[in-house]
Image: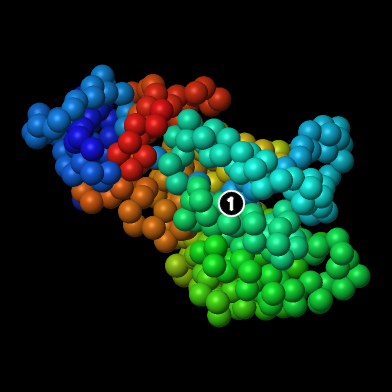
Amino acid sequence: MPSTLITGIGSLVTNDPAQGTGPLGLLTDAAVVVDGGTIAWVGPAAEAPAADERFDAAGRALLPGFVDSHAHLVFAGDRTAEFNARMSGQSYTAGGIRTTVAATRAASDAELDANLARFVREALRQGTTSIECKSGYGLTVPDEARALRIASSYTPETTYLGAHVVAPEYADDPAGYVDLVTGEMLDACAPYARWVDVFCENGAFDGDQARAILTAGVERGLTPRVHANQLSYGPGVQLAVELGAASADHCTHLTDEDVAALAGSATVATLLPGAEFSTRAAYPDARRLLDAGAVVALSTDCNPGSSFTSSMAFCIAVAVREMGMTPDEAVWAATAGGAHALRRTDVGTVAVGARADLQLLEAPSHVHLAYRPGVPLTAAVWRAGVREV
Ligand SMILES: [Zn+2]
């Protein structure tokens, strides 16, 4: 693969404070050299070395590709009617997941694969170069295993979410379902998964059940992440911190103790404003978490029920407008923050040796991601050095 010099970068977000100003490590009049799929050089355009090929950014902004650390993309079916009803006055409960479960079970492998491919491509066109993908719409041993097998051909960030809700067959025997999730289903899924997740919520799994599920996953070599404190206060965040989870996701209803626990831990608070937007719910208080010192990530939660967006730019705009984040904080959270939530050091940054995952904006500054909501600003995308968009 020939090396490429990307020069004429009006504003470059590196997320490396050693390379530029502020937490974003901002550089102006910058250049980047991409070679062999990784970043080979970063610095002032005037000092850039030669490369085989040259791309002129013409003064536009370049930043790391988005790292979307929370998505549910292996599914079939459509929930337009449910959304329409909710926007006409009904409230969101965890039970709607079962609608997608029925459609997903009925779908062929090829149909699920094609759906996932379409969503990954849709996200890529909007600047997302890393994406996490959960199971959780099968809820049987073969259906959960095939979801993860299909997902693992698109991303290394695969998450076993057999504990999304109790499978309908076990409605009267939730303990029996937890036994399945921690036993035979885990055995079938672990080979295709990096992470284990649980929806710790009223109507899904309580603290004791969540602990059993996450602990069983850890014993099989998976690392925990938790759907925590989304719809109500609860034990999810404390459990995530106690078990050393990579992230506690949603964090919409937090006590002072929950905030302190996150701030004092390596567990990232992953905020998913698409869910609150799409359910007309109150947003999480990002400012409170940031001021306490917690690491915050932004992600789409892309799923057909409660947040059917793959747009990280949309999440940035909402986080800035509604959640007290500055544009710099929101852009960091959608790139480096997501990398932290996935415990990745090779993405979410523009530094020598990092994977060459880059997005060029049709704008002079990353601030336009919040300043111009809803406008498709992605001008070019490179993933592992390959121009994809
Ligand atoms: Zn989710």
Would you say residue 279 is visible in this rendering?
no
| Residue 305: image location, x then y, percent | 74, 43
Query: Quarter-wise, where is residue 198 in the image?
Result: bottom right
| Residue 276: image location, x then y, percent | 68, 43
The chosen color scheme is: rainbow
Query: Quarter-wise, where is residue 229 in the image?
Result: bottom right
The residue type indicated by label 1 comes to Ile
- The N terminus, quarter of image: top left
Query: Quarter-wise, where is residue 252 in the image?
Result: bottom right
Residue identified by numbered label 1? 150
| Residue 360: image location, x then y, percent | 35, 29
Q: Is residue 342 left or right of residue 168?
A: left
Q: Camera-side residue: 249 or 158? A: 158
Q: Is residue 191 above or below residue 16?
A: below
Question: What residue is drawn where x is 54% and y is 57%?
Answer: 158
| Residue 186: image location, x then y, percent | 64, 71
Q: Is residue 265 above or below residue 361?
A: below
Q: Residue furthest top?
A: 58
Q: Camera-side residue: 166 or 3? A: 3
Question: What residue is drawn where x is 77% and y is 37%?
Answer: 78
Question: What residue is drawn where x is 49% and y is 56%?
Answer: 157
Q: Secondary structure at mark 1?
A: helix
Would you say residue 332 is visible in this rendering?
yes
Q: Camera-side residue: 91 or 353? A: 353
Q: Residue furthest right?
A: 172
- The C terminus, quarter of image: top left
Q: Is residue 376 above or below residue 190?
A: above
Is the distance from the Cβ of mark 1 to the nearest ligand 1 atom less than 8 Å? no
Count the marks.
1
